[in-house]
Image (tube, rainbow, N blue to C red):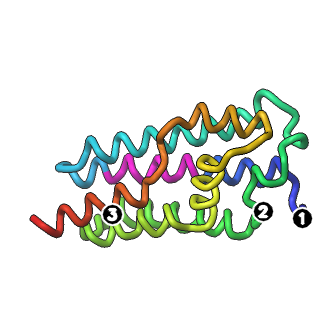
């Protein structure tokens, strides 16, 4: 593995935290959907907490390689994109369709898609099993956001 596991895990945690911040902003900007965005934001916070259990409760180097997305540059780019969007949206709120499509795009980025697959796949490793239990059913964000956007278009 090219990068150390702690660095990869911390960047994955940061993505989850940044997604939560983005969705908190959406809850403020798009009042009719505040409850939806607050719920999704809290799920992203939970994802960060789930991943952080790898830092807090076990030797990080014992995590299986498959537990972590391995492209650190890609992870950093996703975080940069989210942070830029948050800063830009605070200055000039985007049209609802643009904002929701950006959220879908971020949810479908490689790192978020990797996390979702990790949570859905059966694993023998005990840490991943614990992560899956902690994560519960807080997956499918891209589909849920897309459904909300389609509902808006239908109105």
Residue lying at 71% horizontally and 33% vertically, measured from the top left: 53
Question: Residue 73: image x %, image y %?
Answer: 73, 69
Left or right placement of residue 104 versus residue 114 in this view = left
**Circle 3 crowding by C-alpha within 10 Å: few under 14, some 14–19, many from 20:** some
Residue lying at 73% horizontally and 59% vertically, measured from the top left: 69
* Residue 23 falls inside the magenta stretch: yes
**Circle 1 crowding by C-alpha within 10 Å: few under 14, some 14–19, many from 20:** few
Give the mark nearer the N terminus: 2 vs 1.
1
Rendered image quadrant of residue 145: bottom left
Q: Which residues are magenta?
A: 16-26
Q: On residue 2, which mark appears? A: 1
Label 3 residue SS: helix
Question: Residue 86: image x %, image y %?
Answer: 43, 60
Q: On residue 70, which mark appears? A: 2
Label 2 residue SS: loop
Of badges 3 and 1, the one in the foreground is 3
Which SS does the magenta portion mostly show? helix
Label 1 residue SS: loop
Q: On residue 94, which mark appears? A: none
Q: CA distance from mark 3 to mark 1?
A: 35 Å
Question: Tags 3 and 2 in contact by the CB under 8 Å rule?
Answer: no
Question: Tags 2 and 1 in contact by the CB under 8 Å rule?
Answer: yes
In the displayed structure, 147 sits above or below 133; it is below
Question: Residue 98: image x %, image y %?
Answer: 32, 72
Residue lying at 77% horizontally and 54% vertically, measured from the top left: 8
Query: Which image quarter holds the C terminus?
Result: bottom left
Q: Which residue position is annotated with label 3?
A: 146
């Amino acid at each position: 593995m090219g990068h150390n596991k702690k660095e990869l895990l911390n960047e994955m945690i940061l993505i989850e935290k940044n997604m939560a911040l983005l969705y908190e902003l959406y809850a403020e900007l798009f009042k009719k959907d505040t409850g939806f965005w607050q719920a999704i934001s809290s799920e992203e916070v939970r994802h960060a907490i789930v991943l952080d259990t790898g830092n807090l409760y076990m030797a990080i180097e014992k995590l299986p390689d498959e537990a972590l997305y391995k492209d650190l540059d890609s992870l950093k780019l996703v975080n940069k994109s989210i942070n830029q969007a948050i800063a830009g949206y605070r200055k000039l709120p985007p049209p609802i369709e643009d904002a929701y499509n950006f959220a879908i795009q971020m949810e479908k980025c490689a790192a978020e898609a990797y996390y979702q697959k990790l949570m859905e796949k059966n694993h023998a490793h005990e840490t991943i099993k614990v992560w899956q239990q902690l994560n519960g059913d807080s997956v499918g964000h891209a589909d849920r956001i897309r459904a909300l956007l389609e509902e808006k278009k239908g109105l």
